[in-house]
Amino acid sequence: MSAEATNPANPGPITPGAHRRRGRPRIDLRRLGRAALLGPTARGRLPDAIGHVAEAHRAHYPDAVLEPLHRAYVLAESSHRGQMRKSGEPYITHPLAVTLILAELGAETTTLTASLLHDTVEDTEVTLDQVRKEFGEEVAYLVDGVTKLEKVDYGAAAEPETFRKMLVATGNDVRVMSIKLADRLHNMRTLGVMRQEKQERIARVTRDVLIPLAERLGVQALKTELEDLVFAILRPEEYGQTRELMTSYAQRTEDSLAGFATELRSVLREAGLSAEVLIRPRHFVSVHRVRRKRGELRGADFGRLLVLVNEDADCYGVLGELHTCFTPVVSEFKDFIAVPKFNLYQSLHTAVARTDGEVAEVLIRTHQMHKVAEAGVVALGNPYTPSGEEHLDTVGERSDPTRPGWLNRLLEWQQSAPDTDTFWSTLREDLAQDREITVFRPDGGSIGLPAGASCVDAAYAQYGEDAHACIGARVNGRLATLSTVLGDGDTVQLLMAGVEGSAASEPSVDWLDHARTPAARIAIRRWLATHPEGPSAPPSAPRAPYSGPSARPSAANAVVDQPGATVRLAGCCTPVPPDEVTGFAVRGGVVTVHRVSCSGVARMKEAGRAEVGVRWADAEAAEYRVTLIAESFSRPHLLADLTEAIALEGVAIISATVDPPDQGRVRHTYTLQLPDAAHLQGLMRAMRNVPGVYDVGRTRHAAAGAL
């Protein structure tokens, strides 16, 4: 099914049809989907209606057994008899139209059977057990999944929970979502009988949730028509202007795209490449976007050329001929064959210019790629029975090869969303991410993330809530902060507290600034809500109440002259014995301990903070945190050598940053956990002995960018 062909508002002359099978008449889906499936003489038209479904199905599956469809139709028609839609049509027109949409997309027989029955259990006396007995477990499974989605037209408050259920059902079988999308498309086509405010509410939800879901499942034919229907409802003036432009273009006698197509066919024929060249008119929203981007439209802006070939290699052969015989627009080239989109889409995109300056966009793909580009997961048939055999995973459960990674992640975080409002807002944010990247773990595994994701997101994707203990990362072998934005193909090693002597860690409110995925944001917010004292503490400043000489090592054995006070070592200067130190009382009964030479001491005094006496006690029994700065000449593998030198001293790296090289020199900043103060001088000597390092010293200010 072509999205442009089925749009009820599309002018006839610009309807594409060349890509359909030759000799097969086009089914008027608009007519069938709206009022003419049955018409006034309803009973006499019923066999013709199911006949259209059978015809569309056999076009994709010539050997399909149609008997289940006929039986499902008879049950649906008899059970819905007497029910009417708000448009005044017999209710059976709805499941028929939904099933026809799916049949045109290439859905397999089981999906079509369930589609015909998708409202029977909800709206008639037919039971799920009856469906199971008559049509089998698979059909009953799909009907039950769609039934649980409930109706969407009984108030805005119910919509979020409806879609939560829809997503859970989709996670078990993507065919449930396919039926739901077709169901919404037919309802959108017939939305004109409702009040304007209700039309707008349903259109907004369709725009925010269902259209992005259709995009992610690769069902472009449904997505584009839904976009146009929403466009007409929510932006009627711009829709009207776009319609006028498209109608005006369709009435022109000269068609620049047709000329382009003729030239391209000639070029490919001379090169000996067997290919079909078609014109793909843009749909309304696409034309509107191009107009906003380019201003005044030229003839070639109203469509694109589609080149269909038989083999993957032929795609690149066509591309070579195009770029040889025309002038390529380099910035428009994209290879989605070598790197497919996360929604299964594969194609080569390019744009070429003729000598007269006319530019045309060209899509190059195989016939199979085109089928998947139009119908996405619907085109892949029954995901559980490839080659007629049940597809089982290693533990005997049904596994779905069409279930994409983004859906797995969405299902995971939706379980953690504390309330409907959070789920709804987060869902829309998540669906707005229209591009994915893949990063790799050191063990060879991979993690799928939205574009723009950081190491924080990777941590929660890999470890769940255990990522609270993440203290840093290595990206492509180099130490990196958790805020580092990841690129496609990066290798990420996450450094966790409690491993090889590393210190404890916990999320901070800053992590939210770097989290792009819902799973990370929900987990961080939940932790912060249950640890209200956490966000106020400096990330590198350990906390422990003073209780005498045997205070916890995290207090660095600093004894203050204020009994009962909470002792914290200042993160700006990280004092350790035998540093000369002083303390200052701050809010909440806390005393921060600074080195006397710290620049923060003067600021504390100027601010009128009360100075508190501090001494070290039991220095041999405590662990200490210290920040060191290594100055070095730039050379390969320096960071690895420094890290190894630190590890050999038995010291844990809490965080590290590396400034960009400046005139051949590099500055490294490390926050380290020492087993005892006596290790400090030996550690600094070991770091100075690394070739290229010419100075190592203590910081007097907070380490910029520390984790």
Image: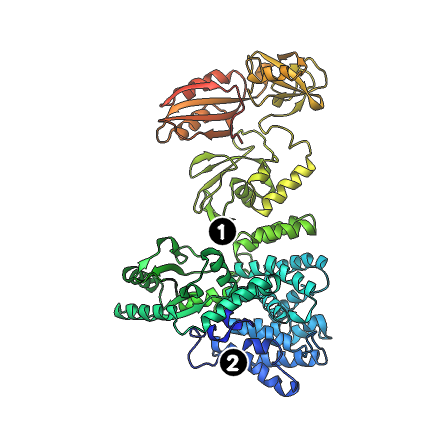
Residue type marked 2: Glu
| Most foreground residue, 641 or 700 | 700
**In screen coordinates, is 411 left or right of 656?**
right
Residue 514 in the image, given as x and y percentages of width and height: 55, 40
Residue 165 in the image, given as x and y percentages of width and height: 66, 59
Residue 104 in the image, given as x and y percentages of width and height: 52, 74
Q: Say above or below: 131 vs 412.
A: below
**In screen coordinates, is 134 left or right of 65?**
right
Residue type marked 1: Glu
| Most foreground residue, 490 or 160 | 160
**In screen coordinates, is 163 left or right of 15?**
right
Q: Residues within 10 Å of mark 1 (few under 14, many from 20)?
A: some
Q: Residue at x 49, y 38 (%)?
A: 484
Please count the marks in the image: 2
Q: Secondary structure at mark 1?
A: strand
Residue position marked by numbered label 2 in the rendering: 55
Labelled pair 2, 1 in contact (Cβ < 8 Å)? no
> Which disc number belongs to residue 436?
1
Dot 2 or dot 1: first in sequence order is 2
Q: Say above or below: 121 vs 294.
A: below
Tell me if residue 387 can be seen: yes
Q: Residue at x 43, y 67 (%)?
A: 370
